[in-house]
Image (cartoon, grey):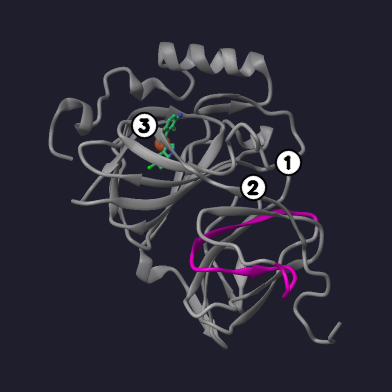
Amino acid sequence: MSYNSAVQEARPVVRKFLARPQPEGVGAIVRRSIGRFELKYFDPFLALDEFSVSAPGGFPDHPHRGFETVTYMLQGAVTHEDFKGHKGTIKEGDLQWMTAGRGIVHSEMPAAQGTQRGLQLWINLCSRNKMVEPRYQEMMSKDIAEAAKDGVKVRVIAGEAMGITSPVYTRTPTMFLDFTLKPGAHLQQPVPASWNAFVYVLDGEGTFSHSRSSPVTAHNLLLLGSGDGLEAWNKSSKPLRFVLVGGEPLGEPVVQFGPFVMNTQEEIDQTIEDFENCTNGFESARHWRSASIRGLDY
Ligand code: FJE
Ligand code: FE
């Protein structure tokens, strides 16, 4: 092993999942890797969807409680609107980091013609943070810091890479890095040893962990085992794009009922009651309908 290398012990790939398209929302398609039956939870990650949606479909009015949703657009744009009047459009390369906390009700709908594509990651919150006030952290593409060196480009969505640190505050300590490797490029990226981490391939073919392992193509999720970082190579003749996501495991019980994620069944029962009665954070849901439901242009 060489001295001065950023990674001393590359994390091995311990499992690989191909995410196949499935229907979700209204006329939308998601490739779900984390959150499906075979991989219900990868602490602290509840779901990873690579979504595709076109008008008139979308994700009309629905609630969330107890976790965060991270929406990162790959193509096109999605308009979101919540029950407290927060509204906006997430365009290609933009990020929305939404801490649902005690409660958000919102819609997420296509904002352009054609196919809108993106990643949506659901990150669990620890018991102490499940009922925090909702909060948004939003970054336009031009404000997401990038670094490039030796054929490796990184966009730092959360955490730190190649000397840059994202301003995004992660209540559950998380890193989220969008890498593009030119043909021939090699990457070593540290990941805290105690964290769970995965790679999701977006484009091209990547070689991960061992330089002689078989290349992995788009829509595959790789769970990484123990070590202090990721090693990756692009041995193909086309660009390779993937995200590397890591997070500190919470080690808490998880009880999930659709878009509600708490620690106990009692808390889930309370959440269903709160949502039905519009209490404990869901007050604004009583009279609110998004433009998509009211039949207006959104
Ligand atoms: C949801 C069904 C859903 N993946 N990716 C049930 F479709 C959703 C939901 C989404 C979603 C939204 C976007 Cl923009 C991207 C997604 C699922 O909205 F929350 C529940 N509970
Ligand atoms: Fe949502």
Q: Quadrant of residue 26?
A: top left
Q: Residue furthest left?
A: 296
Using the image, determine if residue 235 lies above or below residue 97. Answer: below
Q: Which residues are magenta?
A: 194-213
Query: Where is the C terminus found, in terms of image quarters?
Result: top left
Q: Earlier in the sequence, mark 2 or mark 3?
A: 3
Q: Identify the mark at residue 215; answer none if there is no mark.
A: none
Residue for badge 2: 172
Label 1 secondary element: loop
Q: Residue at x 54, y 61 (%)?
A: 217
* CA–CA distance in space, label 3 to label 1: 28 Å
Residue 291, by quadrant, is top left
**1 and 2 marks in contact (CB < 8 Å):** yes
Q: Disc 1 residue type?
A: Leu
Pointer 3 or 1: first along the chain: 3
Tally of numbered discs: 3
Q: Residues within 10 Å of mark 3 (few under 14, many from 20)?
A: some
**Camera-nearest label, 3 or 1:** 3
Q: Dot 1 corresponds to which residue? A: 250
Residue labelled with disc 3: 25
Task: Name the side, left or right, on which 95 lies relative to 225.
Answer: left
| Residue at point 26%, 36% (across, down) | 57
- Disc 3, ligand 1: is the CB inside 8 Å? yes
Q: Quick one: SS at disc 2?
A: loop
Across and down, in percent, residue 266 comes to 65, 13
Residue at image position (73%, 45%) is 249
Q: For this rendering, which residue is in front, 72 or 159?
A: 72
- Label 1 near label 3: C-beta < 8 Å? no
